Image (cartoon, coloured by chain):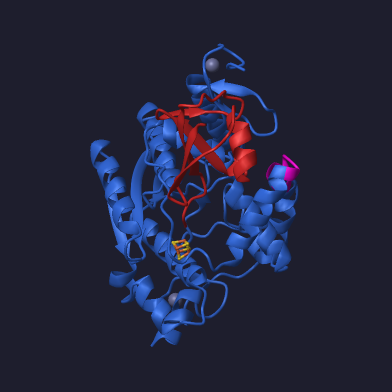
Chain colours: A red, B blue
């Protein structure tokens, strides 16, 4: 299962998913206000994920 | 699905159109759209001295990066950066260093104006003295006040901010809900209802780009986009509106573009309606205001 780090919440979890879209759905994340990186490169919702992938989800909302 | 144009690995799916773009195609798309915004709304002219308001956050640094690049191509435009230090412990410190470093590396004149020095109190101190006031509204009043005063001092002809489509759609909706058309008249990619030498016109080059697009651009340009949240940002009307709009955008894609584009259609009417509004000089500080005393001085009185 891909390992997902949520930057805002500062937590890491494993999520059963084969694409980024599924990760967003399972974690109830609004994809219009985050970006996601894998190995420090941006990926998009349709990107396929393999069980060993580690991804980071970063909110795009500026903090004030 | 690869990039629509060159089949390379995509970095973003564009909102609304659902087109995938790779790194270089996205950068081209983004910069073209900003240039088009600048042209369409006549944001920057020859010989302009643009002061960019920077917070050190991704939006303002990307804006500074872009305008500096433009100035390097069009020699007659001058760029400076102005940072307002509100005095929020643990928040601005790092972003301030980022902003200063960037300016140094790119030979951009960098100026700081701090709440502490200019009004005698940090925002942290102000919120302790006014526990019943929402920090963001006080913060906004003093920040706008200092930005205008300082950019005028720096002989700016334009004041640029990193505001994007998300920010603008929030402001439009907030003013609607509060029935404040006078404030709406001051929105738009080029602000100001009428020209007055005391007011430096503000420009928003990223006006038509979403927050997600701006963050993607910032990431690709190597700016720190790690999440950094102001400790006061949970308690404002704006943040409620922001969440509302984000939920609507997910359910009804195009919501934010719709709000901003329809607003642009009626903005000339708002401006027309308020164009004869008198601008006075504040009795206390001589800064421009529509009343007798400006909001900054009004707040300062409460703090004394
Ligand atoms: S979130 Fe509010 S208090 Fe914090 S910097 Fe922004 S406007 Fe100021
Ligand atoms: Zn491409
Ligand atoms: Zn005043």
Residue at (76% x, 43% y) in the render: B252
Is residue B255 found inside the magenta-colored segment of the image?
Answer: yes
Residue at (35% x, 77% y) in the render: B125
Is the C terminus of chain B in the top left, top right, bottom left or bottom right quadrant? bottom left
User: Seen from this angle, which residue lies furthest top?
Assistant: B6
Magenta: main secondary structure equals: helix
Q: Nearer the viewer, residue B233 or B51?
A: B233
Q: Quadrant of ligand 3?
A: bottom left
Question: Where is residue B164 shown, x and y percent of the image?
Answer: 56, 45
Question: Where is residue B257 shown, x and y percent of the image?
Answer: 69, 42
B280 left or right of B149 in image:
right
Residue B208 at least partly seen: no
Q: Nearer the viewer, residue A50 or B83?
A: A50
Q: Nearer the viewer, residue A5 or B272?
A: A5
| B276 w.r.t. B226: above or below | below
Magenta residue span: B251-259
Question: Where is residue A31 shown, x and y percent of the image?
Answer: 61, 40
Residue at (59% x, 28% y) in the render: A19
């Amino acid at each position: 299962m891909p390992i997902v780090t949520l930057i805002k919440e500062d937590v890491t979890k494993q999520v059963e998913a084969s694409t980024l879209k599924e990760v967003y759905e399972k974690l109830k994340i609004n994809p219009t206000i985050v970006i996601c990186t894998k190995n420090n490169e941006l990926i998009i919702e349709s990107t396929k994920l393999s069980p060993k992938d580690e991804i980071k989800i970063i909110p795009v909302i500026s903090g004030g | 699905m690869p990039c629509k144009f060159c089949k390379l690995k995509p970095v973003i799916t564009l909102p609304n159109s659902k087109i995938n773009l790779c790194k270089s195609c996205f950068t081209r798309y983004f910069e073209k759209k900003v240039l088009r915004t600048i042209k369409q709304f006549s944001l920057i002219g020859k010989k302009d001295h643009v002061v960019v308001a920077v917070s050190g956050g991704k939006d303002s640094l990307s804006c500074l990066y872009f305008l500096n690049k433009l100035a390097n191509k069009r020699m007659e435009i001058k760029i400076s950066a102005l940072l307002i230090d509100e005095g929020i412990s643990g928040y601005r410190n790092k972003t301030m260093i980022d902003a200063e470093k960037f300016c140094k590396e790119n030979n951009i004149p960098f100026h700081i104006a701090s709440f502490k020095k200019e009004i005698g109190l940090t925002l942290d101190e102000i919120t302790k003295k006014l526990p019943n006031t929402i920090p963001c509204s006080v913060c906004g009043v003093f920040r706008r006040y200092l930005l205008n005063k300082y950019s005028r001092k720096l002989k700016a002809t334009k004041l640029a901010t990193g505001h994007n489509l998300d920010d603008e759609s929030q402001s439009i909706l907030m003013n609607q809900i509060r029935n404040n058309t006078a404030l709406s008249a001051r929105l738009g990619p080029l602000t100001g209802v009428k020209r007055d030498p005391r007011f430096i016109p503000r420009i928003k080059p990223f006006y038509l780009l979403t927050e997600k697009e701006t963050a993607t651009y910032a990431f690709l340009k190597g700016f720190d986009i790690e999440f950094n949240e102001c400790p006061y940002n949970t308690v404002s009307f704006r943040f409620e509106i922001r969440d509302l709009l984000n939920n609507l955008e997910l359910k009804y894609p195009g919501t934010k573009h719709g709000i901003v584009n329809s607003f642009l259609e009626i903005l000339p009417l708002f401006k027309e309606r308020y164009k004869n509004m008198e601008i006075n000089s504040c009795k206390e500080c001589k800064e421009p205001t529509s009343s007798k005393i400006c909001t900054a001085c009004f707040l300062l009185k409460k703090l004394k």
